[in-house]
Image: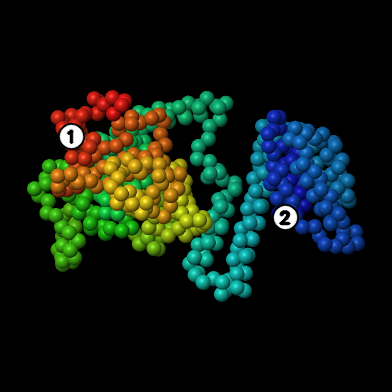
């Protein structure tokens, strides 16, 4: 786009925006940015008055940027000024006449302004892309010694280009939802979505009654959940158990009925064989087939021949496949080397699955901070990790994907154990004791803290809910619960007897050893 056309578009845009009634803002900032990019010819040779014309039009455009928002231009007045600015360039002046002289309805003015603004933004976007690529090329060609890590260099360039990858003529991808209060159908849609959520739509319940009460039904699609715990405190077991429960106790509610519902779990740490073994034991125990389970350790797997391992895996895989797909969910589980993945690879995998016809209801990553933060904001300690959570949440939320990941707690939390703090998980709420970043709670929608406690040679998992972005308040009595361990992890109690405890070592709800939920008063 040459500088003359840019000036025509800038001045026409400012004129048309001045015609809109009750305007509270205009495109002055954008026009100033464009004007600053337009360079005047250095010499005016003979009858070529390009330099004078460019300077005059730039001055007119900038004066329009400085005018009050309520200033209304008379077409004849502005065209008179532009005729002087254009001098002997009649064709240039005619371009201004075509854009300014015609009378338009308010809706046509709005549409014209939007189109002009989009065109100028596209120009500015292309200029920035060229500048980034030009600078990167120069660095590679003339300062190669400054590029010590090619992979990191490419990632940094891609990160700079990322904001400009979107087609400016397409629907703005940053707009997740929009409602115009003048359109009753849009307002009704918002209220129907609220009602749907309050009645359980878009909620993925777990296999534990106490956890479901804590979450007011379960995980919500579109929300990001972090499960905080110290090392070796059942982060993987709890998250994997929750994943199994979502498949067993929920029937898919589709946004797009033409797609296939999918639950996705990505592990950066444990082999799929170990995950399948745990899933197999949990499912068998839930089906009342504990006596048939033969527990195997990592050493057992390593001692198997390839044929034995294949036969064993085939057997449990067939059973797990049947049980996990009982309600219609498709299940995908990945084992990924986190050193070779970034958040972009995670997002690309989700896009690939969507392109293959899946609607992803839950994505569980065990666990997110193991990925390098390449492409994320760098700064003070924790900035990159916080930005990693932000980017993943911003990607998953508009897609209505419930994103769940464990995160190890920091040494500050471990010190509380050394200090003998009672009710450990209750003390974690609001303190931001996450390893590598204290601001993760600012990004996520839901925090769950877990910790293993022992009493009389029995193990219990204490669970405390922290932050939760949700309408209304959750009963404070439901924010903490205790679940007993069995030989095969924590057994599901949905559709059965509630096994929730309110204290470590106590009996189940309603037993003589523990006060039931409904007997608590406000002072409890």
List the single residue furthest toward the front.
Answer: 419
Q: Which is more toward the observer, 84 or 145? A: 145
Measured as percent of width and height from the top left, residue 248 is found at 24, 41
Q: How many labels, in total?
A: 2
Can residue 174 be seen here? The reply is yes
> 2 above or below 495?
below
Image point (50%, 56%), residue name: 380
Secondary structure under tag 2 reads helix
Q: Is residue 514 left or right of residue 467?
A: left
Image point (39%, 37%), residue name: 468
Q: Name the residue under label 1.
A: 508
Image point (39%, 50%), residue name: 434
Secondary structure under tag 1 reads loop
Q: Name the residue under label 2.
A: 37
> 153 above or below 479?
below
> 480 above or below 420?
above
Residue 342: quadrant of the picture: bottom left
Q: Which quadrant of the figure contains the C terminus?
A: top left
Can residue 351 be seen here? The reply is no
Q: Which is more toward the observer, 147 or 191? A: 147
> 470 above or below 392?
above
């Amino acid at each position: 786009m040459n500088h003359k056309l840019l000036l025509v578009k800038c001045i026409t845009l400012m004129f048309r925006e001045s015609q809109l009634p009750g305007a509270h803002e205009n495109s002055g900032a954008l026009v100033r940015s464009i004007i600053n990019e337009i360079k005047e010819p250095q010499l005016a040779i003979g009858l070529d008055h390009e330099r004078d014309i460019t300077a005059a039009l730039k001055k007119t455009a900038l004066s329009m940027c400085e005018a009050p928002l309520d200033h209304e231009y008379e077409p004849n007045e502005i065209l008179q000024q532009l005729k002087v600015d254009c001098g002997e360039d009649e064709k240039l002046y005619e371009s201004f006449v075509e854009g300014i002289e015609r009378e338009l309805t308010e809706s046509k003015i709005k549409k014209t302004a939007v189109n002009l603004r989009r065109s100028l933004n596209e120009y500015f976007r292309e200029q920035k892309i060229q500048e980034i690529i030009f600078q990167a090329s120069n660095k590679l060609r003339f300062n190669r010694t400054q590029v010590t890590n090619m992979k990191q260099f490419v990632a940094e360039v891609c990160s700079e280009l990322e904001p400009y990858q979107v087609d400016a003529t397409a629907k703005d991808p940053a707009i997740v939802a929009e409602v115009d209060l003048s359109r009753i159908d849009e307002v009704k849609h918002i209220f129907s979505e609220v009602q749907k959520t309050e009645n359980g739509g878009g909620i993925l319940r777990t296999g534990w009654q106490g956890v479901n009460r804590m979450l007011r039904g379960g995980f919500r699609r579109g929300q990001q959940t972090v499960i905080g715990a110290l090392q070796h405190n059942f982060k993987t077991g709890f998250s994997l158990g929750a994943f199994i429960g979502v498949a067993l106790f929920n029937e898919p509610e589709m946004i797009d009925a033409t797609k296939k519902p999918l639950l996705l779990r990505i592990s950066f740490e444990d082999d799929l064989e170990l995950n399948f073994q745990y899933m197999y034991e949990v499912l068998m125990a839930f089906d009342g087939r504990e006596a048939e389970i033969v527990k195997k350790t990592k050493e057992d797997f390593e001692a198997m021949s390839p044929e034995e391992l294949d036969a064993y895996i085939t057997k449990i895989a067939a059973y797990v496949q049947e049980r996990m797909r009982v309600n219609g969910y498709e299940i995908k589980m990945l084992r990924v080397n986190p050193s070779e993945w970034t958040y972009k690879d995670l997002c690309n995998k989700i896009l690939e699955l969507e392109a293959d016809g899946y609607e992803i209801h839950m994505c569980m990553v065990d666990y997110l901070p193991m990925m390098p933060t390449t492409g994320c904001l760098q700064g003070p300690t924790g900035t990159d990790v916080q930005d990693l959570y932000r980017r993943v949440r911003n990607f998953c939320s508009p897609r209505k994907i419930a994103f769940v990941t464990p995160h190890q707690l920091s040494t500050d939390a471990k010190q509380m154990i050394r200090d003998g703090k009672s009710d450990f998980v209750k003390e974690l709420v609001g303190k931001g004791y996450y390893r590598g970043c204290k601001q993760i709670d600012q990004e996520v929608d839901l925090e769950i803290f877990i910790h293993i406690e022992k009493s009389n040679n029995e193990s219990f998992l204490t669970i405390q809910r922290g932050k939760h972005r949700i309408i209304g308040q959750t009963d404070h009595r439901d924010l903490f619960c205790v679940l007993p361990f069995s030989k095969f992890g924590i057994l599901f109690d949905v559709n059965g007897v509630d096994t929730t405890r309110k204290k470590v070592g106590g009996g189940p709800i309603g037993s003589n050893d523990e006060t039931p939920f409904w007997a608590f008063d406000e002072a409890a």
